[in-house]
Image (tube, rainbow, N blue to C red):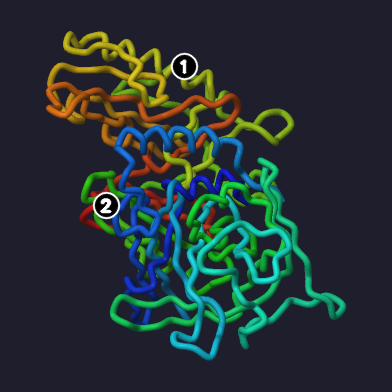
Amino acid sequence: MAKTQTLLLLYFLSTLILVLNKALVNSNGLTLTLIHPHSPKSPFFQGNLSFKERIKKSVSQSKIRGNYLARTSLSTIQTQITAQSFHYKVKVGIGTFKSKPPYKEYYLDIDTGSSLVWMQCDGCTRCFKQTPKPFPKQNSSSFRPILVQNKPKPYEYEYEDGSTTNGILAREAFYLTSKNGGLAKIENIEFGCGLDNNLDALNWRNNKVAGIMGLGWEDTSFVKQVGPQIKGIFSYCLPVLTSKTPSTYLRFGNDIVHQENSKSTPIYMKHKDSSPYYVDLQGITVNRTRLNISPRVFDFKSNGNLGGCTIDSGTPFSRIVGPAFDILKTELEKYFSRFRNLKKIKGNLDLDLCYERSKPEKYNNLPEVTFHLRGADFVMKAEAVFQVVGRSITRLREYFCLAMVPHSTDSTIGSHQQTNHRLIHDTKNKKLVFYPVDCAKNP
């Protein structure tokens, strides 16, 4: 599950939005456009936020997300994604009504760290604010409660920050609209109809998010429910954030392009009822210097509830467990000490390592960083490791910061570090396949 923080993520990069009018339907499946969280096309776009403010919000969300992981005939689908403040989202049609169109449209947060598909329903006793109104289940002719001994089956979902959603489980028709006007209908999707929802993170002004679409390991996730047709595979490719960030896609099944130069590493569950995707992080290299970090630093702790490393689209900046982060920071300080035009500063971005330089160079002369995963190296170019910010209106000076944060117990490979890689989650074969690519040109 994803927590409130997951929801917060929703506000930045961890929110995928299925945009109904930007999809491609063919005999093999469906393609939907992915809208970046900070794109003006996003319904949650905050045009008054400066680039620095967005980075600070990303830092805050990355730290919060550290406490987030939750407890408790289409052969291809490609889902368009959009983001609110922190999370990617999908826009879907749900239900069957005597209206045009014959469904109600809602934004759901996409979350790779949880598995339940749920949304707030009409009749909720404890509700968060949303536009449009909660789903009117009683008016949908395709709404079917899941019954146990002739009573609706209840569900309870709790997030580690204390947020909860409770209600009943049901089945409903979900609609995805293509950019060429085609409409795909997926029947009998199991979802949680939220009737008691304690999710403070969604109580912001003009909230348009109705719930979450989980893409995690468990049987309730959208990935598992769409079933064998998509072979348990989904994929995305995140471009570098710019003022003109291009569209990209969340893809399922046969529409995913595999390349010969791809690498793979195992993905794991922490335990039987775990939703997030874990990878085996074994070390870190800066340029060609392998850091003196014991692989045990990244292991699960003795009780099994802490430690490990997840890969999560909802965490903006990677979180690195404290001892490893300290060594990484020290090595980078050593690397930058060789450059005379650099001055170490605080940076005012809530990031731990920042330098000012006398002339703008963007990502030139900044090192690559490699995460050594089991069986494969995940190599990140400078634009996926740092954030570069203009220092003044004239931009005669600029500064850059390491776009990662320390964490007391766990590690996560965040969305900024995933940029310009095709990432393929193969849940059937339990592996993460990836290869470098310009996501602006090959979404």
* Residue 37 placement (x, y as % from top left): 37, 51
Q: Which mark is residue 326?
A: 1
Q: Is residue 318 above or below residue 215?
A: above
Residue 118 shown left or right of residue 350 in the figure: right
- Foreground pick, 307 / 238: 238
Q: CA distance from mark 2 to mark 1?
A: 31 Å
**The one of 101 and 223 positioned closer to us in this rendering:** 101
Q: Residue at x 25, y 30 (%)?
A: 388
Element under label 1? helix
**Residue 355 sits above or below residue 2 on the image:** above
Q: Where does label 2 land, which residue?
A: 439
Q: Quadrant of residue 254?
A: bottom left
Instruction: Give the percent coordinates (x, y) of residue 18.
Output: 42, 66
Residue 279 image offset from top left, x and y in percent: 52, 41
- For image coordinates 40% across by 32% down, the residue present is 56
Report the residue that reaches farthest toward the front. 205
**Amino acid of disc 1:** Asp
**Residue at horizontal 62 percent and vertical 47 percent from the top:** 200
Q: Residue 392 location, x and y as percent?
A: 19, 25
Q: Residues within 10 Å of mark 1 (few under 14, many from 20)?
A: few
Camera sees residue 318: yes
Element carrying mark 2: loop
- Sequence-wise first label, 2 or 1: 1
Q: Closer to the camera, 406 or 368?
A: 406
